[in-house]
């Protein structure tokens, strides 16, 4: 059996949510199924760390696909031509893009369709590309995998796909996330929050991450509690770096809002484990990986009651309305004053986290692969 895999998001030191999904599931699948030949397609020189086993052949195809015109060139021409020459049993695409015109079976992992509901959150050309081609990819797919029951229903309803042809493959939790001792936490707080407890957000500066309301809610929290707590924002710049800075500059408590930028994985794990709470209030998520990373670190979670997030957090989080600043601030204030609630959420999280593991994710993705053949 031969499976060709789109691995263009496996980039050294730059793994994001979909990149980690690709890394963790493909590592397990390729190592477990040594009788299968996998061809990994990169759009740039690949690092040896992504060649997980001897049954993988890496190929580099140009051009680098980082823009809608280049998406089209790579998937609709370069990948299509290669697939038709190789005629593999399956083309697996962990980022959801497919190759129209390829004659083989194709399995995309469509993590969410936020771009359909909130097209304004993407650059105009990217939004047009996604909203034109992803419905076509969904119809072209032999099967579809996605990362939550919410996304499954969303894709089924909006793209008119039989839900029986959509498989849910939850994300897992990276191995380095774990609780830290009090002294170790204090070292991290000294490094990032002037030694003070902090609420934490992890993610990009995409508009859907709702940082403007989170920062406004933090202002209300500070105004009402007069505490010395900080708000730490960790993540890559999404588009215009000034967007978030402008919101922070308007904050009355801007000196208590700390933006660290993107952090190395090992550092992120420590920052997460040292937080007073994760405040994760996007208005749209297909899954929300930081939620389960916080659970693994025994950090309580405040998250949105919209889209997939209630499904992922279960009874282990405090749910708020991401569209209402006062709802977010009320959650922060309640957690600040109510230590018994905070401890209860931590205990529930210790149970809830066991639902998610990359071993389970890999098994579920492999099952979807087998169904596609």
Image (cartoon, rainbow, N blue to C red):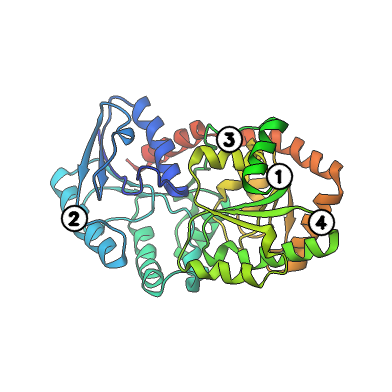
The circle drawn on residue 195 is 1
Q: Going from the N terminus, do you reach mark 2 or mark 4 first?
A: 2
Whole-angstrom CA distance, mark 2 to mark 4, is 53 Å
Which quarter shows the C terminus?
top left
Instruction: Judge by depth and name the residue closer to the eye, 156 or 335.
Output: 335
In the image, residue 30 lies at what x, y percent?
34, 30
Q: In the rendered image, is residue 2 in sight?
A: yes
Pointer 2 local density, CA inside 10 Å: few below 14, some 14–19, many at least 20: some
Q: In the rendered image, is residue 352 in sight?
A: no
The circle drawn on residue 177 is 3
Whole-angstrom CA distance, mark 2 to mark 3, is 38 Å
Whole-angstrom CA distance, mark 1 to mark 4, is 20 Å
Pointer 3 local density, CA inside 10 Å: few below 14, some 14–19, many at least 20: many
In the image, residue 26 lies at what x, y percent?
38, 36
Residue corresponding to mark 2: 78
Residue corresponding to mark 4: 333
Q: In the rendered structure, are the residues bearing label 3 and label 1 in contact, judged by CB atoms less than 8 Å apart? A: no
SS for callout 4:
helix
């Amino acid at each position: 059996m031969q499976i060709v895999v789109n691995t263009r998001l496996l980039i050294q030191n730059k793994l994001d949510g979909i990149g980690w999904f690709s890394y963790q599931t493909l590592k397990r699948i390729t190592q477990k199924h040594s009788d299968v030949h996998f061809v990994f397609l990169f759009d740039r020189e690949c690092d040896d760390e992504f060649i997980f086993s001897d049954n993988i052949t890496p190929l580099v195809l140009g051009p680098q696909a980082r823009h809608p015109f280049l998406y089209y060139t790579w998937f609709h021409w370069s990948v299509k031509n290669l697939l038709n020459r190789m005629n593999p049993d399956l083309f697996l695409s962990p980022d959801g893009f497919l190759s129209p015109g390829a004659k083989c079976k194709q399995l995309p992992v469509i993590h969410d369709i936020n771009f359909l509901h909130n097209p304004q959150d993407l650059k105009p050309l990217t939004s047009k590309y996604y909203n034109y081609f992803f419905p076509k990819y969904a119809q072209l797919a032999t099967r579809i995998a996605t990362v939550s029951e919410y996304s499954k229903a969303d894709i089924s309803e909006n793209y008119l796909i039989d839900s029986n042809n959509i498989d849910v493959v939850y994300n897992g939790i990276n191995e380095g996330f774990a609780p830290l001792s009090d002294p170790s936490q204090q070292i991290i707080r000294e490094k990032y929050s002037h030694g003070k407890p902090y609420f934490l957000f992890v993610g990009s500066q995409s508009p859907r991450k709702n940082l403007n309301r989170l920062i406004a809610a933090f202002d209300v929290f500070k105004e009402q509690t007069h505490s010395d707590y900080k708000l730490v924002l960790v993540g890559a710049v999404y588009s215009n770096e000034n967007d978030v800075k402008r919101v922070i500059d308007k904050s009355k408590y801007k000196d208590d809002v700390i933006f660290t930028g993107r952090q190395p994985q090992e550092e992120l794990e420590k920052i997460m484990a040292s937080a007073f709470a994760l405040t994760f209030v996007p208005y749209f998520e297909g899954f929300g990986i930081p939620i389960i990373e916080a659970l693994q670190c025994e950090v309580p979670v405040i998250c949105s009651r919209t889209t997939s997030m209630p499904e992922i957090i279960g009874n282990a989080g405090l749910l708020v309305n991401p569209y209402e600043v006062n709802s977010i601030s009320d959650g922060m204030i309640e957690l600040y004053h109510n230590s018994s609630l905070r401890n209860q959420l931590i205990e529930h999280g210790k149970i809830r986290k066991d639902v998610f593991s990359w071993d389970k994710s890999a098994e579920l993705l492999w099952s979807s692969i087998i169904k596609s053949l």
